[in-house]
Image: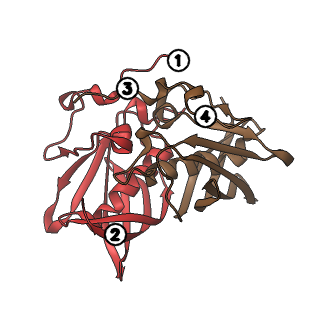
Chain colours: A red, B brown
């Protein structure tokens, strides 16, 4: 099987990355595989994570695959714990409702808010959208496992 | 950034694929990105899907990333609809509970069973394991969108 040109080789300036987003330095493992992902700090301590739907994210309909959106939900909703902290976490439960598709080329954004904290456990509600279209919403339960290493 | 050797270039006989599993012919998009995935028919119309945790699936702990397990849950739990049928489907809601990690090199397997059908909607319960270790369980709601194309 011939392998396609790795999508990671595409330069940021070819991706039309909106103002204020910086590329996350994920240079190995799953983060590199599904990347690149981007992040922007928002007012009041918030954040937005984002990615441009590339050919390596698509399903047969040329929309972003649900599995990719689940993975994006995981790293976005859970990030409410690690944003501006040194805390690391693992995912205990993740639920995502799929509302609309995100086509190839779409700039997909996501954020989350903390809704509960009990001991080491954190519950976050998140949403994912592109333009004016709500793509997915969901809830994650995460466990803090100490400082980032 | 230097790109690693694409994991897809590794031959199946280097992956130690158990008897009876065949590689899914996903040669583009997300399926290629996170693959290769495998499938085996089981008794009574059942199936097992599987993958070997590669370097392109890992988190910082060198376990399979939760996002990869979510994606695997999506294509495995929903497959109860398309296995031995020509039906296609989209994911409406997916919930996954993470129970144990799957380390680099693990042979991760998953299956599902249909628990409800109402109009075009199907509910499936699934589980994911490696060896004797239960890795994740979950529930998916899927919508049939017609014949596969």
The disc label shown at residue A104, or none:
none
Q: Are marks 2 and 3 in contact (CB under 8 Å)?
A: no
Q: Report which quarter residue B123 is drawn in.
A: bottom right
Residue B149 or B126: which is nearer the viewer? B126
The disc label shown at residue B16, or none:
4
Q: Position of residue A73 (x, y in %)?
A: 40, 55
> Of label 4 and label 3, which has the lower sequence position?
3
The disc label shown at residue A145, or none:
2
Q: Chain of mark 2?
A: A
The disc label shown at residue A1, or none:
1
Q: Chain of mark 4?
A: B
Q: Nearer the viewer, mark 2 or mark 4?
A: 4
Q: Nearer the viewer, mark 3 or mark 1?
A: 3
Q: Position of residue B73 (x, y in %)?
A: 57, 51
Write down the residue under mark 3: B5
Q: Position of residue A129 (x, y in %)?
A: 35, 51
Q: Are marks 4 and 3 in contact (CB under 8 Å)?
A: no
Distance, label 4 to label 3, CA atoms, is 19 Å
Q: Are marks 2 and 4 in contact (CB under 8 Å)?
A: no
Marks 2 and 4 on same chain? no
Distance, label 2 to label 4, CA atoms, is 33 Å
Q: Crowding at label 4, few (<14), some or many (≥20) Cα neighbours within 10 Å?
A: few
Horizontal arrangement in the rendering, residue A126 relative to residue B46 (left or right): left
């Amino acid at each position: 099987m011939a392998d396609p040109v790795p999508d990671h080789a595409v330069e940021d300036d070819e991706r039309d990355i909106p103002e204020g987003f910086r590329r996350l330095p994920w240079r190995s493992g799953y983060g590199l595989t599904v990347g690149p992902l981007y992040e922007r700090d928002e007012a009041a301590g918030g954040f937005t994570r984002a990615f441009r739907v590339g050919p390596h994210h698509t399903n047969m309909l040329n929309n972003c695959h649900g599995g990719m959106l689940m993975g994006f939900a995981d790293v976005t909703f859970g990030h409410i714990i690690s944003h501006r902290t040194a805390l690391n976490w693992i995912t205990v439960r993740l639920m995502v409702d799929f509302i609309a598709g995100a086509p190839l080329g779409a700039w997909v954004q996501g954020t989350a808010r903390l809704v509960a904290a009990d001991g080491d456990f954190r519950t976050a509600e998140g949403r994912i959208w592109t333009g004016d279209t709500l793509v997915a919403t969901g809830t994650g339960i995460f466990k803090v496992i100490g400082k980032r290493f």
